[in-house]
Amino acid sequence: MRQGIQSAKIQLNPTSIYNNKEVRLILGVDERLIRKYRDYGYLTYHRQDDKYWYTGEDIIDFMKRTRYEAFA
């Protein structure tokens, strides 16, 4: 995920609001996986009509909850 943040050139700010495309670039994943994260409740979001919005804090919380320590 860190590679996604660096290659996307998007600064992850806890107070900013991001759309689906920006979240995909930040996390480095496909649209379908973002939808699955939303559906399973892993990634919190705000919905207005047919648009999904994510705060920087939502993304940071998701990354903290899904982080695994190295075991080697």
Image (cartoon, rainbow, N blue to C red):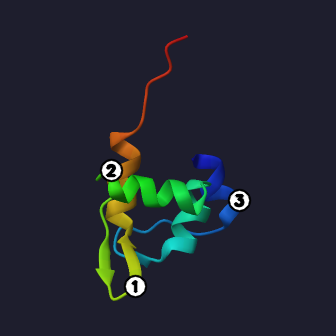
Task: State the CA–CA distance, disc 2 to disc 1.
Answer: 20 Å
Q: Regarding mark 3 in the picture, which secondary structure is present there?
A: helix
Image quarter of the C terminus: top right
What residue appears at the point 36 percent right and 43 percent down from the top-left corner?
64
Please name which of the two marks, 2 or 3, marks the residue nearer to the observer.
2
Q: Residue 7: x, y in percent?
A: 71, 59
Mark before the other along the chain sequence, 2 or 3: 3
* Mark 3: amino acid: Ser
* Residue 65 found in image quarter: top left
What residue appears at the point 48 percent right and 77 percent down from the top-left corner?
19
* Mark 1: amino acid: Asp
Task: State the CA–CA distance, disc 3 to disc 1.
Answer: 28 Å
Residue 44 is left or right of residue 63, and the answer is left
Label 3 crowd bin: few (<14), some (14–19), many (20+), radius 10 Å: few
Residue 49 is left or right of residue 13, and the answer is left
Label 2 crowd bin: few (<14), some (14–19), many (20+), radius 10 Å: some
Label 2: which residue? Answer: 42
User: In the figure, 51 relative to 28: above or below?
Assistant: below
Label 1: which residue? Answer: 50
> Circles 2 and 1: CB distance less than 8 Å?
no
Q: Residue 67: x, y in percent?
A: 42, 36
User: In the figure, 72 relative to 32: above or below?
Assistant: above
Q: Regarding mark 2 in the picture, which secondary structure is present there?
A: loop
Q: Regarding mark 1 in the picture, which secondary structure is present there?
A: loop
> Circles 2 and 3: CB distance less than 8 Å?
no
Which residue in the rendered view is the most extreme toward the right?
Answer: 7
Which residue in the rendered view is the most extreme toward the top?
Answer: 72
Q: Residue 62: x, y in percent?
A: 36, 50
Label 3: which residue? Answer: 7
Which numbered tag is attached to residue 31?
none
* Mark 2: amino acid: Tyr
Front-most of residues 44 and 1: 44
